[in-house]
Image (tube, grey):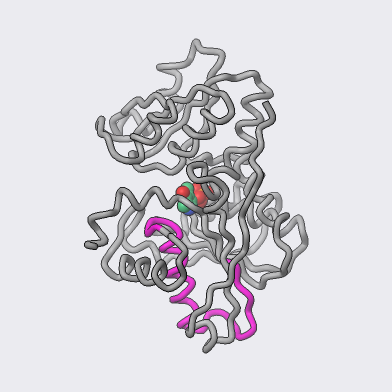
Amino acid sequence: MNIDLEIYSPVHQIHDKLFDEQGLKVFIKRDDLIHPIISGNKWRKLKYLLKEAQTQNKTHLVTFGGAYSNHLLATSAAAAKFGFKSTGFVRGEDVNNDTLFLCRLHGMNLIFADRESYRDKQAMFDKYFAKDGGVFFIDEGGSSALGAKGCSELIDELDDAYSHIICACGTGTTAAGIINGITQHKLPTQFDGVPVLKNGEFLRKDIDGFLDKPTPYNLHTDYHFGGYGKVNDELIRFVKQFVVNTGILIEPIYTGKMLSALYGLAAKSYFSPGSKILAIHTGGIWGLLGMKEKFKI
Ligand SMILES: *Cc1c(COP(=O)(O)O)cnc(C)c1O
């Protein structure tokens, strides 16, 4: 089977008084529209991993994630679509939630692992699958050089030149791919990453590890709102306002933090007048289902 998805990821302009005042043109690339489940950067990260699994005649994808992992969900749907079996190791106690329900609906077998075992993924994988020649190991979040390669293709799709591309960073694989794409196309575009985890400077090591060649980029480390998966009322208000103002659905774990950074940086005149900025909507809106009570609506 040919492992590919037709990419539908248009670029839409975002209008806001703030951007007019600052002389900015702001656009958003709608990777959230690539697929309802295999959304955003998760498809880009999986593409070459699945192709590699197929080349190696593997039939069973095995991967890892938290109980609300967009990566587990995307892998379950991609496995079903392209004819693989799938297993997900889930960090933490045996629970059920909307995300895991959807993983199971796509046929993913879930194995719950306590935090201690989860720390050594390879050992956990070996314990269950060492003697199974059909399994293909995919790291948590799809973090890999092949994942970055898939993400670099986002740049091939751009019709316009941008002074900045801004994107949320979890493992940093997507960031590295985008930076590689910018380099390959010899664009003057500056990359602005927004780590969604606390002390995000540590991501530089991971991002640099996937770069084709050393390249400068910026990380804005003050927009994590308390750490991975953490939100506060200010962020929730921002997300609500953005959705109401634009009709573009976002969640607060990744794209909400990235856009909040974009608006915050614009308000601080970080971008010079005339800048043309492309924000990446990395998808993951099913993550909203784990956040319903935070919205108090
Ligand atoms: C997984 C995810 C990210 C993080 O991507 P990395 O390549 O791990 O940095 C960003 N946004 C969304 C919506 C995600 O699901």
Query: Residue 132: x percent and y percent?
Result: 51, 12
The image quadrant that residue 162 belongs to is: bottom right
Residue at 52% x, 39% y is 142
Report the residue that reaches farthest toward the bottom. 21
Which image quarter is the C terminus in?
bottom left
Residue at 38% x, 29% y is 104
Location of residue 126 with respect to 156 vertically, above or below? above
Let me know if residue 245 is in the magenta part. Answer: no
Query: Residue 155: x percent and y percent?
Result: 69, 57
Q: Nearer the viewer, residue 59 or 136?
A: 59
Q: How many numbered markers are drawn? A: 0
Question: From the viewer's perspective, is 166 left or right of 245?
Answer: right
Query: Residue 153: x percent and y percent?
Result: 68, 50
Location of residue 253 with respect to 110 vertically, above or below? below
Work out whether residue 206 can be spotted: no
Question: From the viewer's perspective, is 258 left or right of 187?
Answer: left
Location of residue 83 with respect to 67 vertically, above or below? above
Work out whether residue 104 can be spotted: yes
Magenta residues (range): 251-278
Query: Residue 37: x percent and y percent?
Result: 48, 42
Report the residue that reaches farthest toward the top. 131
Question: From the viewer's perspective, is 283 left or right of 58?
Answer: left
Let me know if residue 276 is in the magenta part. Answer: yes
